Image (spheres, rainbow, N blue to C red):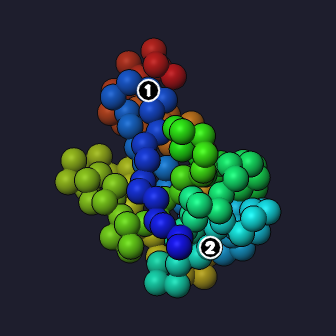
Amino acid sequence: MARSIENKSFHAVPGVDFPHFCAQCEDYPCVKACPVEALSIANKTGAVIVDAEKCIACGKCINACPGRIPHMHPNGKFILICDLCAGEPQCVKVCREGEWNVLKRVSRGNRSYGLYARTPEEITRDLALKMYGEKAEEFL
């Protein structure tokens, strides 16, 4: 049985933690790249779901992702990808409550979600600068 994996944080700068989140590219290159079909697409949300029992941690999904968002679980045995918290991403809620306003839900419309895919390093830079201003450069 596939089990949904919780969001995990990316920690590139001390005090600047943010979740890895998937842009749900319309062509799902990560799903296509998986040699053991451990990745699937949730009907309700369009989120990529990881079946940790099937995943062989080969990393092909990471290399296929334009934002390199999938990442290895700390135990190294399977990949983690944001599952959108069943349609109510808690990272977006916390970001709004904290008034950082760096995360938001984006409706697909007729735009490619691949346009929103950014590497964790790019997102960390933006968030650190927003939080620390010029002082962030010391950490980047």
Q: Is residue 101 above or below residue 35?
A: above
Circle 2 or circle 1, nearest the eye: 2
Report x, y in % for residue 43.
52, 84
Residue with the mark numbered 2: 40
Residue at 44 percent across and 26 percent down: it is 13
Left or right relative to 122: residue 14 = left
Quarter where residue 104 is shown: bottom left
Q: In the rendered structure, find residue 13 and report the number of the disc placed on it.
A: 1
Q: Residues within 10 Å of mark 2 (few under 14, many from 20)?
A: some
Specify the amino acid type for callout 1.
Answer: Val
Can residue 114 be spotted in the picture? no
Q: Position of residue 30 (x, y in %)?
A: 70, 62
Give the distance between the C-alpha atoms of the residues marked 2 and 1, in whole angstroms: 32 Å
Q: Residue at x 54, y 44 (%)?
A: 73
Quick one: label 1, few (<14), some, or many (20+) residues within 10 Å?
some
Q: Residue furthest toward the top?
A: 138
Dot 2 or dot 1, earlier in sequence:
1
10 or 103, nearer to the observer = 10
Vertically, is 31 above or below 55? below
Q: Residue at x 65, y 57 (%)?
A: 55
Tally of numbered tags: 2
The residue depicted at 47 percent of the width and 39 percent of the height is 10
Residue situated in front as seen by the camera: 108 or 66: 66
Q: Amino acid at mark 2?
A: Ser
Query: Residue 131 at x, y = what percent?
Result: 32, 33
Asked whether 109 or 87 is in front, the reply is 87
Q: Secondary structure at mark 2?
A: strand
Q: Are marks 2 and 1 in contact (CB under 8 Å)?
A: no
Q: Is residue 24 above or below residue 121?
A: below
Is residue 86 something one can see in this rendering? yes
Secondary structure of the residue carrying numbered label 1: strand
Quarter holding residue 93: bottom left
